[in-house]
Amino acid sequence: MRAARSTTIIFALVLLAAPVAARAQTHVVERKDLDAAVARRAAEPEAERRRLRSLLGRPDVQRLARANGIDVRRAEAGVATLSADELARIAPYASAAEAQLSGGQMLTISTTTIILILLVVILIVLIA
């Protein structure tokens, strides 16, 4: 009987001490680091929009779009309506076009990439 009571008391003390020990654990990530990560993640879509607008504002891109019958103003207006997922899908194409154009390369690949970006933006605007 005495052993059972001792076991019960020890068990109760362990249960009472467990929440205190759990609260004493150090966090793997500080709150400010989490806040900074959330802020960076929230800013990503707007950064992609700025990059797309910058790409669409380039004279060589506008010239290429006009030559292929694409309305750049409509594509630029459509950039504002793109969701974060849509921007994430377009981002690799925009990066490739930006890299090729900044290097002065005007290859068939860059032309195709720019046309694809413009068409995707226009199609998304039409669907929405």
Image (cartoon, rainbow, N blue to C red):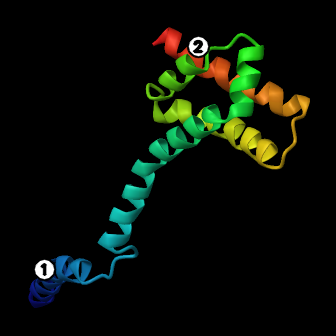
The answer to whether residue 94 of the structure is visible from this angle is: yes
Q: Which of the two residues, 105 or 81, is positioned nearer the viewer here?
A: 105
User: Residue at 48% across / 48% down in the picture?
Assistant: 44
> In the picture provided, is 100 more to the left or to the right than 7?
right
- The label nearer to you, 1 versus 2, is 2
Q: Position of residue 69 (x, y in %)?
A: 71, 10
Q: SS for tag 1?
A: helix
Q: Residue at x 55, y 35 (%)?
A: 53
Residue situated in front as seen by the camera: 21 or 50:
50
* Viewport quadrant of the C terminus: top left
Specify whether 52 is left or right of 125.
right
Is label 2 in a helix, a strand or a loop? helix
Circle 1 crowding by C-alpha within 10 Å: few under 14, some 14–19, many from 20: few
Residue 72 locus on image (x, y percent): 61, 20
Between discs 1 and 2, the one toward the N terminus: 1
Give residue 86's quadrant in the image: top right
Q: In the depicted view, which residue is nearer to us: 2 or 121?
A: 121
Residue 45 % position (x, y): 47, 42
Label 2 belongs to which residue?
123
| Side of 88 where 98 appears, left or right | right
1 and 2 marks in contact (CB < 8 Å): no
Q: Quadrant of residue 114?
A: top right
| Mark 1: amino acid | Leu
The label shown at residue 16 is 1
Q: Is residue 34 above or below residue 89?
A: below
Q: Residue at x 51, y 38 (%)?
A: 49
- The residues tagged by marks 1 and 2 sit, at their Cα atoms, a distance apart of 61 Å
User: What residue is rendered at 18% in x and 76% in y?
Assistant: 19
| Quarter of the image where the N terminus is located | bottom left
